[in-house]
């Protein structure tokens, strides 16, 4: 990701674009020789950075400095470099190319995070765990089912990413205000020939097409759409990391923790969820960063203004670099998640008597009890058991209280048979199977050539 946004990537792409333009102009009939094209190609990757740097000190224009530096290396082609183009021809087309390549890398890492979550969900699809609504104990779910919730959000992000990626187009070569006036002059007003320029450049640069209209720049709305995709991934990663941090507090699930890792400089026993905290931290940065291109897009003046440039040179690369780190962290965390079934079971069983009360009441009715009376007795006994837990600090004794109440006509042994956690997870395990089979596996199969990534994190 760092290389995609590096100066070397940028200036190599500039030269590829100059070659594509020259080739297109030659093919459409301008007086450009194959010898000139060959000279440009021979020096495409041999960038004389020092020459460009010294020239920029004099002329204070980055594009013209690199046109000059390229011309120094290509004396025969010097006169036709950048012919008919404006600075945005190389600048904006390169930005689109760079963002497209960066989206492809993000896509690869996102697919691998989904793949690791799929393995985790499959492994723990039937492991009952206490579910929470409002972070209060609720009807049980399974560890694997909870992982499908994280996965589904990342899959929504993948859908958004694929859509935006499929719509990425080049600016093409449209001149200073987007009217292609310079090409009218070059091609003596031949409209049909001029219509061929953008499609030919797009094809040479690996794109299907160019945006049909523009000012001097491509619409900055494109940057907004791209960074909104990143912000969506960041939101999903943040939710995932928050859940892991809460589960680690409960000692039910932990992120990886190396044998000699130190959790705290003062408290030697601590195991802080530092990776997940870093995911949350970087995710907030990306979500806020998406405002930059939105505001920039909204404040562009007519055919172009330059208050976009400094902003996008920060907000776009930093958004991608941050999301790249976020996905590395997610991949590392999911790959090494540690589950503690005994702790999960202990917490679940401490709350299960409350959740089993409806089943207990139904069994008591079958044995001849009155449903309305039993409902009131269970409510009263539940309040008493709740006081024992919260005020007295004792274990949940609701089953013992019910067994001692003659209204229920049930022994403690009878009641304990209702305490199988698997009875209360509904269709969770089946839902995991169906989700993996029908939704996740087809996506992974379609992207199998991207799978197999790992990520090592320096904590």
Image: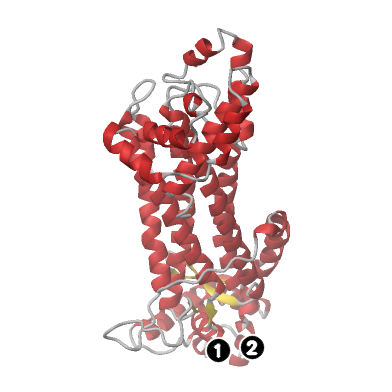
What color scheme is it?
A: secondary structure
| Disc ID at residue 414 | 2
Residue lying at 60% horizontally and 47% vertically, measured from the top left: 159
Q: Nearer the viewer, residue 378 or 137?
A: 137
Residue 163 place in picture, x, y as percent: 59, 41
Q: Is residue 48 above or below residue 179?
A: below
Please rate how many residues cluster around mark 2, counting C-alpha atoms within 10 Å: few if below 14, some from 14 to 19, many from 20. some
Q: Is residue 311 left or right of residue 357?
A: left
Q: Quadrant of residue 212?
A: top right
Of helix, strand and loop, which one carries label 2? Answer: helix
Q: Could you tell me if the residues under marks 1 and 2 are in contact, i.e. CB atoms within 8 Å?
A: yes
Residue 425 place in picture, x, y as percent: 62, 71
Residue lying at 47% horizontally and 88% vertically, measured from the top left: 397
Q: Quadrant of residue 139?
A: bottom right
Q: Nearer the viewer, residue 317 or 297?
A: 317
Q: Which residue, given by chain and number where applicable, does mark 1 sit on?
A: 403
Q: Is residue 172 above or below residue 266?
A: above
Q: Is residue 263 left or right of residue 333?
A: left
Please rate how many residues cluster around mark 1, counting C-alpha atoms within 10 Å: few if below 14, some from 14 to 19, many from 20. some
Q: Does any portion of residue 167 appear in the rendered image?
A: yes
């Amino acid at each position: 990701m760092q290389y995609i946004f590096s100066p070397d990537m940028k200036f190599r792409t500039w030269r590829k674009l100059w070659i594509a333009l020259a080739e297109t102009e030659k093919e459409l009939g301008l007086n450009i020789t194959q010898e000139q094209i060959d000279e440009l190609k021979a020096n495409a990757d041999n960038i004389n950075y020092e020459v460009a740097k010294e020239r920029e000190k004099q002329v204070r224009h980055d594009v013209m400095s690199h046109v000059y530096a390229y011309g120094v290396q290509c004396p025969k082609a010097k006169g036709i470099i950048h012919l008919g183009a404006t600075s945005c021809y190389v600048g904006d087309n390169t930005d689109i190319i760079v963002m497209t390549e960066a989206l492809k890398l993000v896509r690869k890492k996102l697919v691998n995070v989904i793949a690791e979550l799929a393995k985790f969900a499959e492994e723990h699809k039937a492991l009952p765990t206490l579910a929470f609504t409002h972070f209060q104990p609720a009807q049980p779910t399974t560890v694997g089912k909870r992982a499908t919730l994280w996965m589904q959000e990342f899959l929504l992000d993948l859908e958004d990413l694929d859509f935006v990626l499929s719509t990425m187009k080049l600016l093409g070569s449209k001149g200073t205000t987007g009217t292609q006036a310079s090409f009218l002059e070059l091609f003596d007003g031949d409209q049909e020939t001029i219509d061929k320029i953008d499609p030919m450049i797009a094809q040479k640069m690996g794109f299907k097409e160019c945006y049909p209209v523009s000012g001097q720049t491509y619409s900055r709305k494109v940057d907004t759409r791209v960074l909104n995709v990143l912000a969506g991934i960041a939101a999903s990663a943040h939710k995932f990391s928050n859940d892991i941090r809460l589960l680690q507090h409960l000692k039910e699930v932990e992120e990886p923790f190396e044998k000699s890792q130190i959790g705290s400089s003062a408290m030697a026993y601590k195991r802080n969820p530092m990776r997940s905290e870093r995911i949350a931290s970087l995710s907030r940065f990306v979500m806020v960063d998406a405002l930059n291109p939105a505001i920039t897009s909204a404040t562009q003046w007519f055919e172009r203004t330059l208050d976009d440039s400094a902003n996008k040179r920060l907000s776009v690369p930093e958004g991608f670099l941050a999301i790249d780190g976020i996905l590395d962290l997610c991949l590392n965390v999911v790959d090494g998640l540690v589950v503690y079934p005994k702790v999960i079971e202990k917490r679940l069983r401490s709350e299960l008597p409350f959740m089993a009360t409806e089943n207990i009441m139904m069994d008591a009715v079958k044995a001849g009890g009155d449903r309305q009376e039993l409902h009131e007795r269970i409510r009263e006994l539940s309040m008493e058991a709740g006081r024992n837990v919260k005020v007295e600090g004792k274990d949940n004794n609701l089953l013992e209280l019910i067994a001692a109440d003659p209204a229920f006509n049930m022994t403690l042994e009878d009641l304990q048979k209702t305490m199988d956690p698997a009875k209360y997870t509904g269709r969770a395990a089946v839902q995991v199977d169906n989700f993996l089979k029908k939704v996740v596996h087809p996506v992974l199969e379609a992207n199998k050539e991207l799978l197999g990534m790992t990520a090592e994190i320096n904590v």
